[in-house]
Image (cartoon, grey):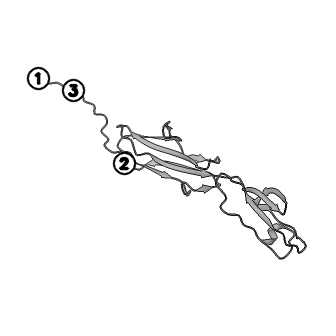
Amino acid sequence: NNETTETIIYDNLDPIKPELELNSNGYELGTWTNKNVTLSVRNVANNLSPVEIFVSKDGENWENYNEIIIHSEDTVATGVTYYFKAKSAAGLESEIVTGNVKKDTVAPTGTIELGDNGWRTFLNTITFGLFFNETKEFRLIPDEDISGIAKVEYLVLEEDFNEPRDAL
């Protein structure tokens, strides 16, 4: 009649690998915007144990993810990529989920050349006065900017307007 009582503690019983879902709150990842971008991430797996979520901007140096990310600064041409991963108490890691943000709030600039003369201004606020029925040739030369110039447009009007917005 030898009886022994022993307490056994089982760790790492959660067999479920965390799975992250990235929410960009209406922003289409990897496209250009001029507004702040909000990113949030959550674990959608039904883990039995607590799950920690981590964030990185280089995929190597990880920090605890505690709250939503609001990206408010302009980016370089390739954007900023956020990396997210999760780890369960059992040591199981999720796949890495990424989100690329591209933000550019700088108004495009360029040069307008009229004959031999040229000047620089915001391209979206240029108006030409009347040229007294003369034919004038001009060139619009956009500068490169962070997100690139999608298009350059101009409008030729036959009538005079006091304010540029009246022409539209």
Q: Tell me if I can see residue 65 in this picture.
A: no
**Neighbourhood count class around disc 3 (C-alpha, 10 Å): few under 14, some 14–19, many 20 upward:** few
- Which residue bears the numbered disc 3? 6
Q: Check disc 2 and give the amino acid type.
A: Asn
Cβ atoms under marks 1 and 3 closer than 8 Å: no
Disc 1 to disc 3, C-alpha distance: 13 Å
- Which residue bears the numbered disc 1? 2
Disc 2 to disc 1, C-alpha distance: 43 Å
Disc 3 to disc 2, C-alpha distance: 31 Å
Q: Check disc 3 and give the amino acid type.
A: Glu
Q: Check disc 1 and give the amino acid type.
A: Asn
Image location of residue 3, percent across then percent down? 14, 24
Label at residue 92: none
Image location of residue 49, percent across then percent down? 36, 40
Q: Quadrant of residue 124?
A: bottom right
In the rendered view, does 14 fall on the left or right side of 115?
Answer: left
The residue lying at 52 percent from left, 45 percent from top is: 82
Q: Tell me if I can see residue 20 in this picture.
A: yes
Cβ atoms under marks 2 and 1 closer than 8 Å: no
Q: Quadrant of residue 164?
A: bottom right
Label at residue 46: 2
The residue lying at 91 percent from left, 73 percent from top is: 132
Q: Point out the residue furthest to the left here.
A: 1
Say which element carries label 3: loop
Please, is residue 2 above or below residue 99 in the view?
Answer: above
Say which element carries label 2: loop
Which of 143 and 82 lies nearest the eye of the viewer?
Answer: 143
**Neighbourhood count class around disc 2 (C-alpha, 10 Å): few under 14, some 14–19, many 20 upward:** few
Please, is residue 13 above or below residue 7 in the view?
Answer: below
Q: Point out the residue furthest to the right here.
A: 132
Depth check, mark 3 against mark 2: the one in front is: 2
